[in-house]
Image: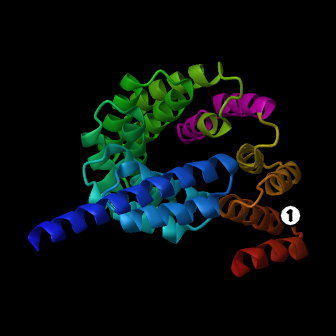
Amino acid sequence: MAIWILLLWTALAQEGAASHDANLQAARAYIAQGSLAKAAESLDLALAAHPDAGAEPYLMLMDCRLKLDQKEKALDAAERGVKRYPTSGPLLKAAGAMILQEDSSSDRAGELLERATRAMPQDPGAQYAYGLWALMNHHEEIAVAAESRALALSPSDDLRVQAETFIGLGEDALKRPQRAEAAFRAALAVNRKLPHPNPSAALEFAMFLTRQSRQAEAQTLLDEILRFAPAFGPAHLERAKYLFAQGDLESARAEGETALAQSGSDPKSLRAAHAFLARTCFALGRMEEAEAHQSWIESH
């Protein structure tokens, strides 16, 4: 009897493995065809039959669910994968980054990303993501250290621009303006060489210069940003704030309207532009326009 049970178990295990392989193969084929919903179904079947199939199927499933805008299912796949493979660097990094994107204050994101840096100490992306989490949660010393490690590991100019910018922000928050400026300048030097410079990174330097009461330098940098990114709303809003401070309210309002028009669907940018325009229109005595902007803020 024992031998038959053993043979039956062996047969079932082989059948499960074959089904798992078939489902994985089907998922890869569906992904290649762009049929992400079918790919996700195949991956779910594969992992239900064989949850210890490795980290890759969980990563594939997370990616499919995210592209299908099924964030809860993507998070579930991430947590299941991390539970099965708690030392998998790629899983920890992907799961932590996904949670961070959904909730920047998440302690869970920080935990997973810190574990990813230990699992993959030579991976610049893990260091970069952990540094971003730390910066967004006011752990500036950790952020500066992590982004410095990312810089030492990565030859990517895009990553260097971002990492140097985050170092600048961290150093500024730590009240070390000379170090902050050195990092911002390093970011700008690389940024200028990119085929498509990053306006957000350059704007952080301009805002730093404004905080340092170096308005002329800040406005010169804003001019440069608006030359390579004329439709970048946040730069127009910073220019509008400068014009308001100079007492040129009509020009400030016009620039604010441009910022609003170029804010797209970003809630933070929209709110900032409406708030500025409400204040500016009140100052100009354009009460109906001011109230319209205030009403938008209150309804959002």
Residue 300 visible in the current orientation: yes
Number of marks present in the image shown = 1
Q: Quadrant of residue 299?
A: bottom right
Depth order, front residue of 96/68? 68
Q: Position of residue 252 (x, y in %)?
A: 82, 51
**At x 64% / y 46%, what residue is drawn?**
32
The amino acid type, in three-letter code, at marker 1 is Leu
Task: Identify the secondary structure beneath mark 1.
Answer: helix
**At x 38% / y 43%, what residue is drawn?**
131
Depth order, front residue of 65/210? 65
Q: Position of residue 295 (x, y in %)?
A: 77, 79
**What sort of colour scheme is used for the picture?**
rainbow
Q: In the picture, which quadrant includes the C terminus?
A: bottom right
- Callout 1: few (<14), some (14-19), or many (20+) C-alpha neighbours within 10 Å? few
**At x 72% / y 74%, what residue is drawn?**
297
Residue wearing tag 1: 284
63 drawn magenta? no
- Residue at far left of view: 2
Q: Does 41 sit left or right of 75 as displayed?
A: right
Extent of the magenta region = 204-228
Q: Does 272 sit left or right of 176 as displayed?
A: right
Tell me if residue 15 comes above or below residue 133 in the rendering: below
- Helix, strand or loop: magenta stretch: helix
Q: In the picture, which quadrant includes the N terminus?
A: bottom left
Q: Position of residue 274 (x, y in %)?
A: 76, 65
Q: Quadrant of residue 8?
A: bottom left
209 drawn magenta? yes
Tell me if residue 212 comes above or below residue 189 in the rendering: below
Q: Does 107 sit left or right of 200 as displayed?
A: left
Residue 136 visible in the current orientation: no
